């Protein structure tokens, strides 16, 4: 905390080196280290200040994905940090407990910099969440899992050349920067905070033995109630908090199986739709600390009320464009009014998979191809998968922050698509 009671974080974007394959090192990038960045953590209501220094030899930015904050603090291409410069955003955390993250967002270079390793988690805490019987001892029974895939060449170096039109599809999964990881736990119940930090791959997380688990949270915070399931699909940028029970002395493997992408066509393979990948081996100790049962209810999430919506806007995804246009930093595409709710209809008019992310807000899914959202889409979201030919309707409340000049972004979070222009800008006034 500084003299003004603000929680201060220092981040330095820097070049690094890492051995993903023992004995073979590759250039990487990270915050405050060789790869990825520290988990930042703050409480609802707390004022935070971050000093972001750019020690790279090129422009970067740091965007707080999922955070409600003034547009000038959002870390978009409009807040570029030149090499050697420091940027100091500050804001008050004004949202419920959630697993958020941060990553660069420089114009046209986001996919490259995230792929090189620039990403980290930003956890928000609140008193309601803290009062629930949920595992929350960081690194002990509450485990952050930043999952991304990379392609390594014969020398063990990060390869970005072999891309398909969706981006790089890796042959190696890294969890918190480690290939082939395992985790030893001593609690009978653990919470896994999953972030899909891949630039293109879609995962369908579950366990090799098909054991059930409870999905307790999604992008913007806790669900209304735990949802018992065996699989959770995450497209790039999405998060899930799951709670799983372990058996003393036994191992289980967190595994991604081919995700249901709503398409049977050739594009499926391009975002990993045919791959089975082991993510993390979890080894339970012979003696496990008992845990209380999960609560029946988690958060108060009223059903979304479409009647709140004052405007409906359409966003058609096609090619590498939204509504027939490519990202133009000097063009504002939409202007919305603070403290109003709108319906955003996002349609994928393309034969390729895309998703859709909106800055500054947490939204609710009203329906998916006319059907009510399944439980994993029933809570607060900021990124949603949109299958080829699919249409999703979102209810979004904007504000309270306004800025007549500095826009926020919405875009496909397959980062190559974002870089190629599948992004637009909106003002909140
Ligand atoms: Cu994580 Cu504009 O994105
Ligand atoms: Cu974002
Ligand atoms: Cu896309």
Image (cartoon, helix red, strand yellow):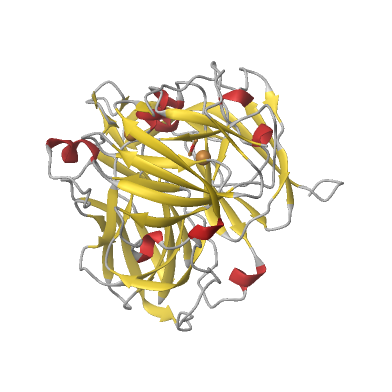
Report the number of numbered marks. 0
Which of the 4 quarters of the picture holds residue 52? top right
Which of the 4 quarters of the picture holds residue 57? top right
Where is 225 relative to 70, above or below?
below
Position of 351 with respect to 310 (left or right) is left
Q: In the rendered image, which quarter contains the C terminus?
A: top right
Q: Position of residue 242 (x, y in %)?
A: 40, 65
Q: Nearer the viewer, residue 12 or 368?
A: 368
Q: Nearer the viewer, residue 185 or 229?
A: 229
Q: Position of residue 148 (x, y in %)?
A: 35, 42
Position of 106 with respect to 88 (left or right) is left
Q: Furthest-right residue in view? A: 3
Can residue 146 be seen from the camera position used here? Answer: no
Can residue 381 be seen from the camera position used here? Answer: yes
Where is 398 relative to 266, above or below?
below
Position of 22 with respect to 106 (left or right) is left
Q: Tell me the residue at 67%/35% (across/down).
A: 73
Q: Position of residue 399 (x, y in %)?
A: 65, 46
Q: Position of residue 8 (x, y in %)?
A: 73, 44
Where is 359 relative to 369, above or below?
above
Q: Nearer the viewer, residue 397 or 155?
A: 397
Q: Nearer the viewer, residue 285 or 347?
A: 347
Q: Tell me the residue at 34%/74% (across/down).
A: 246
Where is 382 relative to 89, above or below?
below
């Amino acid at each position: 905390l500084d003299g003004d009671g603000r929680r201060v974080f220092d981040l330095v974007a820097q070049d690094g080196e890492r051995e993903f394959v023992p004995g073979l090192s590759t250039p990487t990038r990270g915050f405050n280290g060789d790869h990825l960045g520290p988990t930042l953590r703050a409480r609802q209501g707390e004022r935070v200040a971050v000093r972001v220094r750019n020690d790279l030899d090129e422009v970067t930015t740091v965007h707080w994905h999922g955070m409600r904050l003034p547009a000038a603090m959002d870390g978009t291409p409009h807040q570029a940090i030149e090499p050697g410069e420091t940027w100091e955003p500050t804001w008050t955390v004004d949202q419920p407990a959630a697993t958020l993250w941060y990553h660069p967002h420089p114009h046209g270079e986001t996919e490259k910099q995230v792929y090189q390793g620039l990403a980290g988690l930003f956890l928000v805490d609140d008193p309601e969440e803290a009062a629930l019987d949920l595992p929350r001892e960081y690194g002990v029974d509450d485990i952050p899992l930043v999952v991304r895939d990379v392609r390594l060449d014969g020398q063990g170096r990060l390869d970005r050349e072999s891309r398909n039109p969706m981006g790089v599809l890796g042959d190696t999964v890294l969890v918190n920067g480690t290939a082939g990881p395992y985790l030893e736990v001593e609690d009978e119940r653990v919470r896994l905070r999953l972030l899909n930090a891949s630039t293109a791959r879609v995962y369908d997380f579950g366990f090799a033995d098909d054991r059930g688990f409870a999905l307790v949270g999604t992008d913007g915070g806790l669900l209304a109630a735990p949802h018992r399931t065996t699989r959770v699909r995450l497209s790039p940028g999405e998060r899930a908090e799951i709670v799983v029970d372990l058996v003393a002395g036994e191992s289980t493997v967190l595994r991604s199986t081919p995700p249901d992408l709503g398409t049977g066509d050739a594009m499926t393979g391009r975002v990993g739709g045919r791959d089975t990948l082991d993510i993390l081996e979890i080894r339970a100790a012979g003696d496990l600390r008992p845990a209380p049962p999960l609560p029946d209810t988690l958060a108060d999430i009223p059903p979304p009320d479409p009647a709140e919506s004052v405007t409906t806007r359409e966003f058609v995804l096609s090619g590498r464009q939204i509504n027939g246009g490519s990202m133009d930093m000097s063009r504002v595409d939409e202007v919305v009014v603070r403290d109003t709710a709108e319906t955003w209809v996002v349609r994928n008019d393309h034969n390729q998979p895309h998703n859709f992310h909106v800055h500054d807000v947490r939204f609710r899914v009203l329906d998916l191809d006319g059907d009510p959202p399944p439980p994993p889409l029933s809570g607060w979201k900021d990124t949603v998968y949109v299958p080829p030919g699919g249409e999703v309707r979102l209810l979004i409340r904007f504000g309270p922050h306004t800025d007549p000049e500095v826009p926020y972004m919405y875009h496909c979070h397959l980062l190559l698509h974002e870089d190629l222009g599948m992004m637009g800008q909106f003002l909140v006034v």
